[in-house]
């Protein structure tokens, strides 16, 4: 059982790392900045693979309850906001900067638990939220590659992530499984992003993309779709096999190796102030892992 958990954790880290690096390559190096098409492609591949897995008996999907599907619809809308804004932000920001801002979503969920649900919150979790917020707040003033549009979309992304997590936790247990929720997310995203591709100009603008007929673009897009699907599966498996504290530790480890390796592979100007903000965010994330392991 211990080896199985380690294998699942390592698989998750590999998928997390490969997914982020591939997406960053497509968005920033190839400059494929057509998010309705890119995210629509990824969710289409994910939805098709999940549907085939269901038909082959490899995954169990039960979305027969109309009331449950309608109840989940607002979360699917937020999911589209998460992936769309995330794509826009990642195309302009370095991966460590993006992850630092992404982590602030934990502050939103923590604040909701403390202020609205009146749940007991440990001092470690409160300190974690403060560190994450301070790191993200100081980062724009110390980022030598500051991009206003990138930060704007990152803020939209983190609010959508926070709201999505709140809705996910508010769902009644045993109504929709994680796989059911993701299947609905895929279906809704494909429809909404396809409808939005023309009004946003992405559908016609992509015709001017210089690498449209290049094999490296096709290969990268295919890889991003499959990696996104396997990342989703490994995340679901990770959460089902491990306690919240262990799961948080693996996610933290995946973020650390992804941020560290991305600095070596992509251009990023590091100053002492920027490094300080990134380390403060890492400390906040480590405290979050500690609080999860203590069960508070």
Image: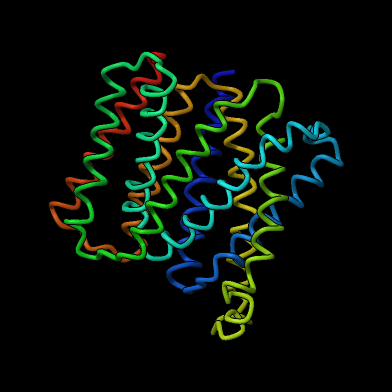
Q: What is the residue that sits farthest to the front in this orientation?
A: 116
The quarter of the picture where the C terminus appears is top left
The quarter of the picture where the N terminus appears is top right
Please tell me which residue lies in front, 287 or 213: 287
> As drawn, is 210 to the left or to the right of 65?
left
> As drawn, is 287 to the left or to the right of 270?
right
Image position of 275 with respect to 289: above or below: below
Residue drawn at point x = 29 percent, y = 31 percent: 129
* Residue 111 on image: x %, y %: 36, 29
Image position of 161 with respect to 28: above or below: above
Residue drawn at point x = 20 percent, y = 46 percent: 277
Please tell me which residue lies in front, 74 or 253: 74
* Residue 30 on image: x %, y %: 48, 74
Q: What is the residue that sits farthest to the left in this orientation?
A: 272
Residue drawn at point x = 70 percent, y = 56 percent: 45
- In this figure, what is the number of numbered marks? 0
Query: Quadrant of residue 237 in the image?
Result: top right
Residue drawn at point x = 76 percent, y = 52 percent: 48
Please tell me which residue lies in front, 84 or 99: 84
* Residue 232 on image: x %, y %: 61, 42
The image's colour scheme reads rainbow
């Amino acid at each position: 059982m211990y080896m199985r958990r380690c294998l699942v954790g390592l698989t998750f880290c590999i998928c997390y790392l490969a997914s982020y690096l591939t997406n960053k390559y497509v968005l920033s190096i190839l400059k494929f900045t057509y998010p309705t098409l890119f995210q629509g492609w990824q969710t289409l591949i994910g939805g098709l693979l999940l549907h085939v897995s269901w038909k082959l008996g490899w995954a169990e999907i039960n979305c027969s309850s109309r009331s449950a599907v309608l109840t989940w619809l607002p979360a699917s809308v937020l999911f589209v906001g998460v992936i769309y804004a995330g794509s826009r932000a990642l195309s302009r920001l370095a991966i460590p900067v993006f992850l630092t801002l992404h982590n602030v979503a934990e502050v939103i969920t923590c604040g909701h638990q403390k202020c609205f649900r009146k749940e007991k919150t440990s001092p470690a979790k409160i300190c974690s939220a403060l560190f994450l917020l301070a790191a993200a707040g100081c980062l724009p003033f110390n980022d030598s590659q500051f991009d206003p549009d990138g930060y704007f979309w990152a803020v939209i992304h983190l609010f959508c992530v926070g709201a999505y997590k709140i809705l996910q936790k508010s769902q009644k247990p045993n109504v929709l499984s994680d796989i059911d929720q993701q299947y609905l997310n895929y279906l809704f995203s494909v429809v909404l992003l396809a409808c939005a591709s023309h009004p946003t100009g992405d559908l016609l603008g992509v015709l001017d993309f210089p690498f449209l007929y290049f094999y490296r673009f096709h290969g990268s897009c295919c890889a991003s779709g499959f990696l996104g699907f396997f990342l989703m599966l490994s995340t679901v498996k990770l959460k089902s096999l491990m306690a919240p504290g262990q799961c948080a530790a693996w996610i933290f480890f995946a973020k650390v190796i992804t941020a560290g390796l991305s600095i070596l592979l992509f251009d990023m100007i590091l100053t002492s102030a920027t490094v300080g903000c990134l380390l403060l965010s890492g400390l906040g994330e480590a405290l979050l892992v500690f609080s999860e392991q203590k069960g508070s």
